[in-house]
Amino acid sequence: MMDEKKRGRPRAFDASAAIGKAREVFWDRGFSAASLDNLSAATSLNRPSLYNAFGDKEDLYLDALEGYRADSMVALEDALDPSLPVRENLARMYDRALATYLHGDTAARGCLLISTATVEAVRHERVREVLGRSLADFDRAIEDRLALAIERGELPEKTDPKALARLASTIMHSLAVRARAGETREALEALARSAVDLICGVP
Amino acid sequence: MMDEKKRGRPRAFDASAAIGKAREVFWDRGFSAASLDNLSAATSLNRPSLYNAFGDKEDLYLDALEGYRADSMVALEDALDPSLPVRENLARMYDRALATYLHGDTAARGCLLISTATVEAVRHERVREVLGRSLADFDRAIEDRLALAIERGELPEKTDPKALARLASTIMHSLAVRARAGETREALEALARSAVDLICGVP
DNA sequence: ATATTTTTATGCGAAACAGTACAAATGTCC
DNA sequence: GGACATTTGTACTGTTTCGCATAAAAATAT
């Protein structure tokens, strides 16, 4: 990236690394229960630095959501690699989702967007916007892959790719909720398998 | 109910009505962002009365969740009335869910459990327990109806009722998330319809 | 060197917060 | 009527919260 030396004292920290640390805090506690003291401790930045670099708590949260969204999109596109069979694509998609959702110390954390942004969406319009856009992007990415599958004859011609894609991402939403509710990895993997069977047909 | 007159000054309010008012507050703001002042204003009770009657904020929240869970179970059992075809049962189930989820002033509120308890589940064990139990109860109720449907020949004999039931409730989780994320009623109704088609087969 | 610009650190302050002490109010029991 | 038990309202405590004011620190520009 462009590295033009700016005047003034240089930053002693990496901004995106700090957002990453903040993401962890928000993921565990949610937006409302995450205090600036928590965030300050996790990022090793004192409050004025946080404000100077990112704005207020909501701004920082939106940055964290946006980073998570971008990372998730990359992972999704990778899982949906069109050189693989659709069936495998879906299995990979759920697999990676679970790997993320189940990563937690005591209780699983689910999905940062689904499990923490949802509650704020009513009263924070910008959060609702990011959440809505993220869900739509996910739906769309799956739809594109399914449309290709229909074209290739992997799925019946009469299939509605948009409807089926929205059904497929439905499973991810539920995996996120159920993981955070404490369901076991085995139960979630079984759910994902039966979802693949239902969507692609039993092999 | 038993109405044994207790000694001491009688309550000037209806406890379950107060919990109902509290439910609305938690539903809009979530647990963490709901303050005792909000709850006190909504219930028209001052804080000492709240503490005396229900305990602390978490206790009150758990009461609200429990009431919601019970109401939802009644509505679900009613939607799953075994004198109707399964297909209609599922349609009714999603219909009623949407009627609840979309009821909101500005933005839809989704499901109290899925949309507000999920975020707290990591750090509040009792909330996680109620949430997990609620999801399991819903799965079970649907499973029972599906098992009956298989017995009656409404569904193929080889169907796994438990797996299919969990897939069916998956749709409700997603409807809750999507409603709160701002999706339109039309989009959600379309999703519900295609879910029924996928689960029961296109008619 | 001196001025300028930006980041860091300490710490302030005002508001919101959860929870409670205490006394007045309102009922039952004897 | 008087003792007792419970609820209610006011006001309080101590903590946590967010956001900022202020000044020191660390770099560049001239």
Image (cartoon, coloured by chain):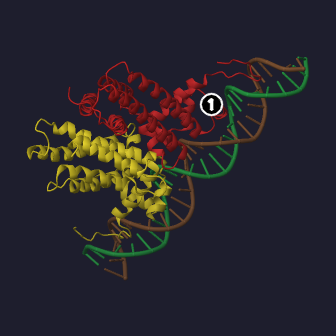
Chain colours: A red, B yellow, C green, D brown
User: Is residue A125 positioned above or below A161 on the image?
Assistant: below
- Displayed quadrant of residue C25: bottom left
Position of B68 with respect to B85 (left or right) is right
SS type, badge 1 = loop
Front-lying residue, B58 or D3: B58
Q: Does residue A197 show up?
A: yes
- Give x and y (percent) for residue C12: 70, 42
Position of A16 with respect to B150 (left or right) is right
- Give x and y (percent) for residue A203: 20, 25
Residue at 35% in and 67% down: B14
User: Is residue A69 positioned above or below B171 on the image?
Assistant: above
- Give x and y (percent) for residue B165: 22, 41
Front-lying residue, C2 or A80: A80
User: Is residue A10 positioned above or below D1 on the image?
Assistant: above
Front-lying residue, B35 or B29: B29
Residue at 36% in and 64% down: B17
Q: Mark 1 points at which residue?
A: A46
Chain of the residue on which disc 1 is drawn: A
Residue at 25% in and 40% down: B198
- Displayed quadrant of residue C11: top right
